[in-house]
Each structure stands twice: as C-alpha cells, then as structure tokens.
C-alpha cells in the first residue's frame, strides 16, 4: 500500500513536469536551424511587433494598420524583445514554453475524470500531439491561444464562485479573444456556463457573475473593434490561398489518428466513429454539466463555428486536439468501467501512440536538419533559406519601393517594407509605378487573389534586372 502511494505521488508531482520539459526541448530542437518556422502569417506578427517596439503602432510590413490579425501575439513578442532577445527568437522561446505549459494544463484537466493509469497515458499522448507540436514549431499565435484555452477550462471546471476566480476567468477570456478572434467563443460559452451550471451561487448571484463576465471580458475586444472600424477597416478578410474541399480537410484531420497508408475511407470512418461516440456521451446526459460534458459541448460549439462560418483548416482546429484527447480518455473511463477491459484499452492506446510519437520524432529530426515547416509557404526551410532568391536579395539590396508576389518572404529576408501586387478585380492605383518600383516575382508561388505576371505585362513595361532559376527581378515602368 505504501508503495502505491509513493507511485501516485510521483505521478502527480514529477511525471507531468518531466513530459512538459521534454515537449519544450523537442520544440527547441526542431527550431534549432533557422529558428521558429516562418509563414505568411509569421511575417505579419513579426512586422507588427517590430513596429510596436519602434513606437509606430500596429503596422504591418506593408505599412498598413493591423486589422485581420488580433493584436496580442505581436504585442507579446514586442514586450519580450525589450529584454534584448531578437523578435524571431522571442517567438521560438515563447511557443516552446507554451507547448510545455499546455501539457501541464492538459494534465490538470484530464486528471479530473480519469484514473491514474489513463491519466498517465493521456499525458504521454499529449507529448506527441502533432497538431499542437507543429504549431509550436512555427511563429504562430495558436500555442499561446491553446495555453489560454486550457487555462480557461482549468479555472472554469474548478469553480467560479468567488470574485477572484471570476476576475481570473475574465482576464483569460479577454486575452484569448485578442490572441485569436475565435477566442470570443470562450466568452459566449463562459456566459452560458456561469448561468446554467450548478454551483454554490444562487440564481441572482449567477446572473450578476455572468453579467460582469460578459461586460468585462468583451470590453478589450470591443475597444479593438472600434479602433479597427475607425480606420475604415474590418476584422475579416476574403483573401486567401484558395478554398479546399471538405475531402481535403477530412484528409488532413484524419492524419491525427491514422497514417496516410491507411485508406482514406477507413480514416474518415474512424473520424466519424470518434465524433459519434463523443456526441453520444454528451447527449445521453446532456443536462449534467460535468467536466467531460462541458469539454465535449465546447468542442461541438468550436468545430461547428468553423464548419458554418469559416473553414475547418487543420491549423485552426489544432486548439481542439488537447480537448479531444482529454474527452477521448474520459469516454474510455465511462465505457470501460471494469479494470480488465480498461487494461486492454490501455495496451491498445499505447500501441496507437507509436504512430503520433513516430510522426513527431520524424518531423523533429527533419526540422532539425532542414528547418521547421515544409511546403510552398514555409520560409524557414532549406529550399528558401539557401535558395538563390534569398542570396540575391541579400547581395543586391534595393533602394526605393519594392513589390513582390512573395512580399512576406522579402520582408522576412530584408526587414524592409514590401508591397504585394494588386489584388484581382481591384482598382489599380495610377501612381502604382510612379517611382519605378522593383518587382520580385517568384515563379513557384501562385496566390489566386493577386494579379498574375502576365496581367502586369499588359499594363506596364517590365524591364528585366535579373533572371534566376526560381524568380525574376524587374523594374516596372509605365508604358509610353
């Protein structure tokens, strides 16, 4: 009996911290070559942080006010840079730490409705949560958002029955909505839980708490909205990289659970079975807002939002992965009350964990060797960092205005303000080429919302400055 107590104490005190430290180290190893992964969004975050640090306000590398992206992540990077650390390094350390903290918060949540054996295995699977791990290796806002999301549920599930706890919940929800706009769902969800979840508060007290929460948690987002609105801008944008079909999204999401070698139909079937099980467990006892049901209910709200109003892109749904893991282990606890059956489930889950573990380890090695990310729009990889375009830009700095269909990459390389070519169906400004800007055109990049190179040729004279294998450098002149 004494030995069991010792093991339980070790499990609760040290194992989660050891895993969290391991997760942080994995991210740091993955980002060792070129720093945290860089993408088009990363250029926005870093440029806004740079302007904030310089006292210029919320401006992007195109010298446009920030609107479509929330302000908190760039603000955190700017604050961290005041210690002397480089902005890019600040993103690397912040997201690595966020991954470790999210593992500790996950442990605290899943331990509320699972026994020690399942909690142990759940913590291990969280270490190899590839969607969360990948975001942590990038200069993305999701890792900090995941920390705020999990912290929100830790506070909410442990009870909000004192002014201090309410103040903490308000602060978390407000910050989450300024980190990712979808964090506003936490405010809506929190209002509902404060009103209808059983607690020691009477009805009038719950109404007061919910009213205070609704007012104060939304206040920062409302202030930011009016700031954006006064600039004549909106917090939404129709531009993007082209729509993906539902099958593409399902294919990406199914890789959370099964490798690509498994037939697509089988992977989608597994997704559907998991969804049905979670919804059924909630529906059977939906009036009981216990921790498991609360988590499942929020996942339904969150995923439903993206299905109806946005697009269920893997990156956007990554914050749900820790909650999905927690809920999954909670469902196992309910469906398998007998210890014998639960032990069998533990063995099967341990075998399945080899898949996400292999995926994380494989990518950690790959990122360490070639840079974090991979693909057309991931700029901190060998193909971009060692490419001839980057070398040429660094060796031949341009004066005057610059335009590029990879303006984000050019900014990340030079730190200079760069413009994109006009958007499709936009009114082209008459002074677009008044100062004969340099045009850097990367031939492997096609952004459907921008005009093509041939469209520019029809309107302007393109004088070749340099032809590279992957790109061309031109000077734009008005046709006489």
Image: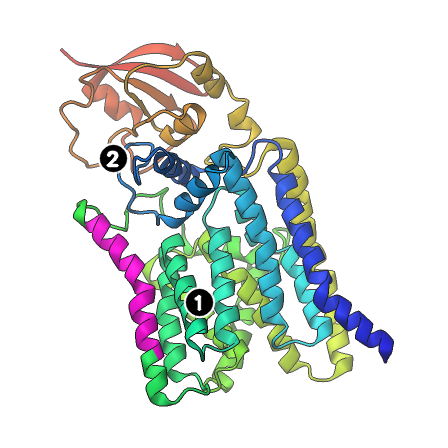
Report the span colored magenta. 209-229
Give how far across and how far down residue 347 sits, in percent.
76, 68
The residue at the point 36 percent across, 68 percent down is 187
Residue at 70 percent across and 71 percent down: it is 118
User: How many numbered badges does the structure rendering display?
Assistant: 2
Residue 420 lies in quadrant: top left
Question: Is residue 31 found left or right of 229 in the rendered image?
Answer: right
Is residue 65 left or right of 26 when viewed as pictured?
Answer: left
Residue pointed to by mark 2: 423
Q: Position of residue 334 (x, y in %)?
A: 63, 81
What number is the disc on residue 168?
Answer: 1
Which class describes the residues within 10 Å of circle 1: few (<14), some (14-19), or many (20+)? some
Q: Is residue 170 above or below residue 98?
A: below
- In this picture, is 234 found above or below 453? below
Residue 99 image label: none
Whether the magenta-drawn stretch holds residue 263 is answered as: no
């Amino acid at each position: 009996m004494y030995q069991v107590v010792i093991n339980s104490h070790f499990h609760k005190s040290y194992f989660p911290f050891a895993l969290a430290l391991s997760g942080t180290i994995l991210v740091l190893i993955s980002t060792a070559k070129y720093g945290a992964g860089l993408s088009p969004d990363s250029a926005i975050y870093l440029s806004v942080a740079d302007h904030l640090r310089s006292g210029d306000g919320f401006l992007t590398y195109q010298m446009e006010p920030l609107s479509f992206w929330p302000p908190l992540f760039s603000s955190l990077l700017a604050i961290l840079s005041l210690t002397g650390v480089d902005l890019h390094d600040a993103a690397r350390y912040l997201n690595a730490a966020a991954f470790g903290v999210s593992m500790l918060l996950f442990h605290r949540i899943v331990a509320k409705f699972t026994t020690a054996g399942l909690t142990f295995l759940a913590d291990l699977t969280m270490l190899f949560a590839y969607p969360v791990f990948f975001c942590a290796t990038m200069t993305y806002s999701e890792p900090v958002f995941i920390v705020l999301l999990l912290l929100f549920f830790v506070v909410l599930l442990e009870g909000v029955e004192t002014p201090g706890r309410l103040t903490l919940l308000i602060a978390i929800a407000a910050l989450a909505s300024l980190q990712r706009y979808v964090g506003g769902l936490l405010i809506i969800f929190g209002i509902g839980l404060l009103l209808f979840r059983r607690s020691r508060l009477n009805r009038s007290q719950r109404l007061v708490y919910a009213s205070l929460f609704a007012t104060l948690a939304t206040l920062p987002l409302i202030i930011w909205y009016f700031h954006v609105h006064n600039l004549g801008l909106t917090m939404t944008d129709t531009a993007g990289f082209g729509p993906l079909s539902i099958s593409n999204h399902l294919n990406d999401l199914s890789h959370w659970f099964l490798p690509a070698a498994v037939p697509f139909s089988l992977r989608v079937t597994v997704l559907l079975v998991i969804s049905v099980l979670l919804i059924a467990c909630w529906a059977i006892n939906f009036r009981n807002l216990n921790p498991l049901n609360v988590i499942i209910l929020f996942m339904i709200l969150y995923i439903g939002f993206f299905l109806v109003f946005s697009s269920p892109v893997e990156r956007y749904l990554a914050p749900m992965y820790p909650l999905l893991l927690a809920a999954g282990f909670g469902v196992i606890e309910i469906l398998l009350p007998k210890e014998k059956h639960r032990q069998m489930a533990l063995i099967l889950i341990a075998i399945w964990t080899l898949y996400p573990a292999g995926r994380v380890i494989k990518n950690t090695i790959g990122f360490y060797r070639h840079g974090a990310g991979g693909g057309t729009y991931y700029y901190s990889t060998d193909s971009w960092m060692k490419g001839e375009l980057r070398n040429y830009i660094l060796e031949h700095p341009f004066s005057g205005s610059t335009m590029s269909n990879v303006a984000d990459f050019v900014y990340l390389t030079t730190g200079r303000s760069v413009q994109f070519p006009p958007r499709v169906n936009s009114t082209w400004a008459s002074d677009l080429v008044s100062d004969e800007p340099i045009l850097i055109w990367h031939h492997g990049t096609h952004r459907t919302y921008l005009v093509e190179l041939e469209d520019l040729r029809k309107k302007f004279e393109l004088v070749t400055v340099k032809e590279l294998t992957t790109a061309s450098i031109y000077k734009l002149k008005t046709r006489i």
